[in-house]
Image: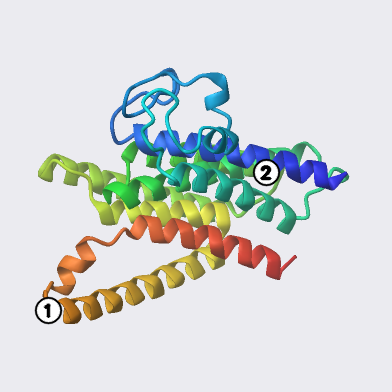
Amino acid sequence: MDIFLYIIVFIMGTVFGSFYTLAIYRIPNKIDITHTHSFCPNCHHKLGFFELIPVWSYIFLGGKCKECKQKIRPRYLIIEILSGITLCLIAYAAKISFWNLNVNTLIDIAFFALYLSGIVIIAGIDLEKRKIEKSVIYYALGILVLYIIYLCIVDTPNIYRYIMYLSLTLILLIIDTLNLKKKAKTSYVLSILILIIIMAVFTGEAVTILSITMTLLTISFYIILEKLKQKRSKVSNSEKKICNNLNIGFYLTISNIVMLIAVMYIVR
């Protein structure tokens, strides 16, 4: 029975993945993500039903638009498959089966899926634009508040912990708003700090610390590689310039997902 459950979970993951690719493209370009019909970014051909089936449509169309034959970026297929696999891994690590499904479990899954959607979209946009979209941060904060309210209803959590996190978030948002008025742009660093708070609530402090550690190690490795490339090409860039091009949000969110799955399997 569980094999059918995980097939369903994988399909759901690919559907989420398809939405991620849509949101990653549209949000930075200020295109509506709910009411505007899916279209080819090259010829603006509106996609039909069979062109919208995750994974299958990419394979069926040979990775090309049906109308203009423009190649579709492989990232669409990769994100859809990885989303399906990731959701299956998380479900398996959480020991989810047909026999233990209940209302609370389904609500927990729904909240985690919404959280995962937020951080994956943040990661994708940051990778392409090196920007933490404020609208996605606000979405994640909205889910965060709802999740805290839900926990307070069904459990007896340490309310002071959540008050502390929400207070810190409010302070950071006020500082960021003042920074926006002064410099006409939001602070990348402040957005990263808010993202870390969101991670701490949803995945716990231990996973968040591990995620930060993994991110710092990845960044250090990246800087070393860049320095080695510079020596070979004899082109010199300062460490500050290299750091300014780092997609910290991308590394942090991917590290968070990896560490969460790893910890879940360890304590399984």
Q: Element type at marker 1?
A: loop
* Left or right, 230 with reference to 162: left
In the rendered picture of this protein, how many numbered marks are placed on residues? Answer: 2
Report which residue position mark 2 lands on. 10
Q: Quadrant of residue 218?
A: bottom left
* Left or right, 172 with reference to 148: left
State how far apart marks 1 and 2 are (Cα). 47 Å
Q: Residue at x 31, y 48 (%)?
A: 128
Q: Position of residue 167 (x, y in %)?
A: 40, 49
Q: Residue at x 81, y 39 (%)?
A: 102
| Residue type at tag 2 | Phe
* Label 2: how many Cα within 10 Å (few below 14, some 14–19, many 20+): many
| Residue type at tag 1 | Lys
Viewer can see residue 79 = yes
Asked whether 40 or 119 is in front, the reply is 40
Q: Quadrant of the N terminus?
A: top right
Residue 88's label in the rendered image is none
Q: Residue at x 46, y 48 (%)?
A: 119
Report which residue position mark 1 lands on. 234
Viewer can see residue 131 = no
Asked whether 135 or 36 is in front, the reply is 36
Q: Element type at marker 2?
A: helix
* Left or right, 143 with reference to 73: right
Q: Position of residue 96 (x, y in %)?
A: 78, 50
**Comes first in the chain, label 1 or label 2:** 2
- In the rendered image, the vertical position of residue 196 relative to residue 119, given as above or below: below
Q: Residue at x 41, y 26 (%)?
A: 33
Asked whether 263 or 85 is in front, the reply is 85
